[in-house]
Amino acid sequence: MAAGNALRRSLTGWGRTSPSQASVVAVHGAEEVAPALLDAGARGLIPRGLGRSYGDVAQNGGGVVLDMTGMNRILQLDAERGRVTLEAGCSIADLIDACLPQGWFVPVTPGTAHVTIGGAIATDVHGKNHHRDGSISRHVVEIVLVDPTGEIHRLGPDSEPDLFWATVGGLGLTGVIV
């Protein structure tokens, strides 16, 4: 999959420094992630959202970068409980646009809303209210993770907590949050 669906691109972080070349594979559903992981080759694969990370965290020069922005759907919005189920490529801006008319706001907003939820979880972002509300991990109930072997895990603070806490803030190194 990676070879046939990949586009060679120059990637940078938000600061536009230190570009590197990678094979970029776009995915549009969770079922496409495992084959991409298994076909990634020796340099492996790193997921990438909207490219707003500082530095080179989502570049993987010479390897495969999984473009997660095609997985950007809000699957369920429970306005009564204030819970949302969404794909990892959904931006915080899109989440705010969906939640605000329902009377809700995202509990943690980083310096830009143009980051994906998967990226926000992978970096465990914080906002100006960190001293009171903590980082995004404090508000995540469950993550679906595809590990490097293609196995799917449902994990949360109380369900597979070791893998959950390694994934939150783990920069995509435990697998791909879908």
Image: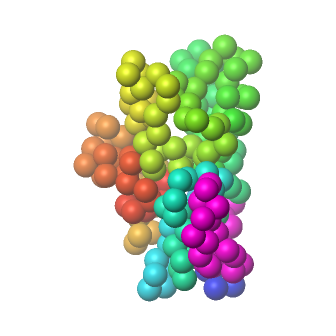
Numbered-mark total: 0
**Which residue range is magenta in the image?**
6-29
In the displayed structure, would residue 30 be above or below residue 26? above
> Residue 39, position in %: x, y?
53, 81
* Left or right for 40, reference 133: right
Query: Where's residue 154, x and y in %?
Result: 41, 48
Where residue 29 sits: x, y (%)? 65, 59
> Which residue does the image show at 70% across and 20% down from the upper left?
100
The image shows residue 154, relative to residue 110, as above or below, that is below
Residue 13 left/right relative to 174:
right
Identify the residue shown where x is 50% and y is 30%. Answer: 127
Could you say which is closer to the camera, residue 52 or residue 15? 15
Residue at the left extreme, as displayed? 162
Q: Which image quadrant for residue 22?
A: bottom right
Which part of the image, by quadrant, shows the N terminus?
bottom right
Instruction: Please tell me whether residue 18 belongs to the stretch shown in magenta.
Output: yes
**Residue 80, x across and y down, in percent:** 59, 15
Q: Residue at x 59, y 75 (%)?
A: 20
Q: Is residue 100 visible?
A: yes
Q: Is residue 45 left or right of residue 90?
A: left
Give the residue drawn at x 52%, y 73%: 60
Residue 140, visible in the rendered structure: no
Q: In the displayed structure, does residue 103 sit left or right of residue 132?
A: right
The residue nearer to you, when weighing 167 against 29, is 167
